Amino acid sequence: MKIDNSTSSTWQQMDAAHHLAPFTDYAEIREHGARVITHADGHYIYDGDGNMILDAMAGLWCVNVGYGQQSLVDAATEQMRILPYYNNFFKTTNQPVAALSQRLAEITPDGLNNVFYANSGSEANDTIIRMVRHFWALEGKPAKRKIIGRTYGYHGSTVMAASMGGMVDMHRQAADQPDFEHIRPPYAFLYQGNSDEAEFAAHSASLLEDKIVEVGADNVAAFIAEPIQGAGGVIIPPAGYFDHIQAICKRHDILFIADEVITGFGRTGHWFASQAMGLAPDMMTLAKGLTSGYVPMSAVMVGDRVAQRLIADGGEFYHGFTYSGHPVASAVALANLDLIEELGLVTRVRDETGPYLASALARLADHPIVGEVRSYGMLGAIELVKSKDGPTLFEDVGKAGALCRDHAIAHGMMMRAVRDGMIMSPPLTFTTQDIDKMVDIVTLALDKTAADLG
Ligand code: PLP
């Protein structure tokens, strides 16, 4: 079908009549229509009404190298010509996926030398659930099935991944599988109170040990955590938190899984947050920045302990997807990794743009409706509050956040609201000028939101 230059409303009507979009209120979209994104270039997306919008979310936290990167387009085109598809089932592979596997083993933390591919973060996490249960069964401990996650954790939308995540609204919509437990995350803004950082870190981690004791270590397969909780609101752990967590997992012989779907591929100023925070996970989930979102692909990095057991005793693992290790996705991932290296994005975020973003956001801390700003690499959050005393949160949770987000979009910038937290996760190619522009629009949006709220 040819995409012509019809106005947005033509497409909106067509879309609203048939498209059940993800995380969308269907009634609302049928009434008002969706925003139609027509194209993108660099750091901007363009809609069907002629608006040019600075994308401070990198799509959905994924377009790490920005839009319009020709080398990724070329890699896809070339691979489609050579081998557009073949599966990896039944002792078959392809060249790009073999090369990508070696590359991922090199850049991920030591010991993660094995990789299973899927198409989305959700599928990768579903794979992890099956793998860890299979692993413990092979170890002669089939009762170790429970997986502990965290409130506000997000691990995807399949029934299992959403049950493992800690989003209660999702649990209420038939994502309430048994054998998943959740603990409170180290969300300092809400829970730190008067304790100091070290106490808060130790106390937050002790909740894991309490949960393990409550359900019995013999029943627990794994603990899963995003090193920085993204969709939950960019919740950055206090120093030392994961040292305690890892010690607790070791003490009770529980696998530790790092979901790096958002934090991977340079976003934290390191290839992976695990390296920044000294984590040695048994398994790691990757997606999003793996291909910068240009094509779907995800991966499970599997540590040697688990992999060796599966290899030695597992026999055939009855699990896989038609597109696991897709040659075109693998070729795009390789081109994406090359580009991240060529442009020096990891060190740029660590040494230049990450610190610049932190200081630019810090200037907003005095704004009358800002309770806290925080950032890590190219992840940022601003907590809106009714009053700085306390601070006092808004009673009508989400209203101020939505207002502020809508003002930002109206002024040409895409940002996200999580409850009343404003979230930014721009492409890693953002320059300091882009950050200045982003913070100027955020400031405007904050002023307008404060005025709206009276
Ligand atoms: N894990 C994390 C940390 C995520 O942020 C997401 C998506 O936002 C997922 C898993 C699920 O990935 P997908 O939407 O590709 O299924």
Image (cartoon, helix red, strand yellow):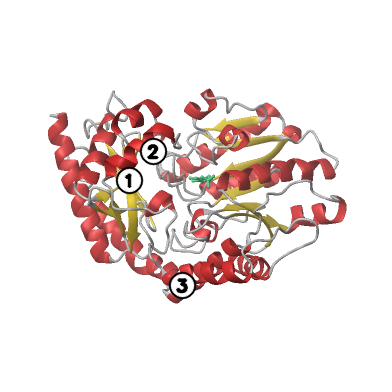
Measure the alpha-carbon separation of dots 3 and 2: 31 Å
**43 sits to left or right of 87:** left
The numbered mark at residue 15 is 2
Where residue 190 appears, x then y in whole percent? 38, 34
Question: Do tag 3 and tag 2 residues touch (Cβ < 8 Å)?
Answer: no
Q: Earlier in the sequence, mark 3 or mark 2?
A: 2
Question: What secondary structure is found at the residue carrying circle 2?
Answer: helix
Foreground residue among 431 and 211: 431
For image coordinates 61% across by 62% down, the residue present is 109
The amino acid beneath tag 1 is Val
Where residue 311 appears, x then y in whole percent? 82, 56
The residue carrying mark 3 is: 71
Where residue 123 appears, x then y in whole percent? 61, 45
Q: Where is 23 relative to 139, above or below? A: above
Question: Do tag 2 and tag 1 residues touch (Cβ < 8 Å)?
Answer: yes
Q: Earlier in the sequence, mark 1 or mark 3?
A: 1
Q: Earlier in the sequence, mark 2 or mark 1?
A: 2
Identify the residue at the far bottom of this view: 342
- Crowding near pointer 1: few (<14 within 10 Å), some, many (20+)? some
Identify the residue at the far front of this view: 1
Say if residue 10 shows up in the picture: yes
Q: Where is 62 relative to 422, above or below? A: below
The numbered mark at residue 50 is none
- Would you say the beta carbon of the disc 2 residue lies within 8 angstroms of ligand 1? no
- Crowding near pointer 3: few (<14 within 10 Å), some, many (20+)? some
The amino acid beneath tag 2 is Asp
Question: What secondary structure is found at the residue carrying circle 1?
Answer: loop
Say if residue 337 shows up in the picture: no
The residue carrying mark 1 is: 36
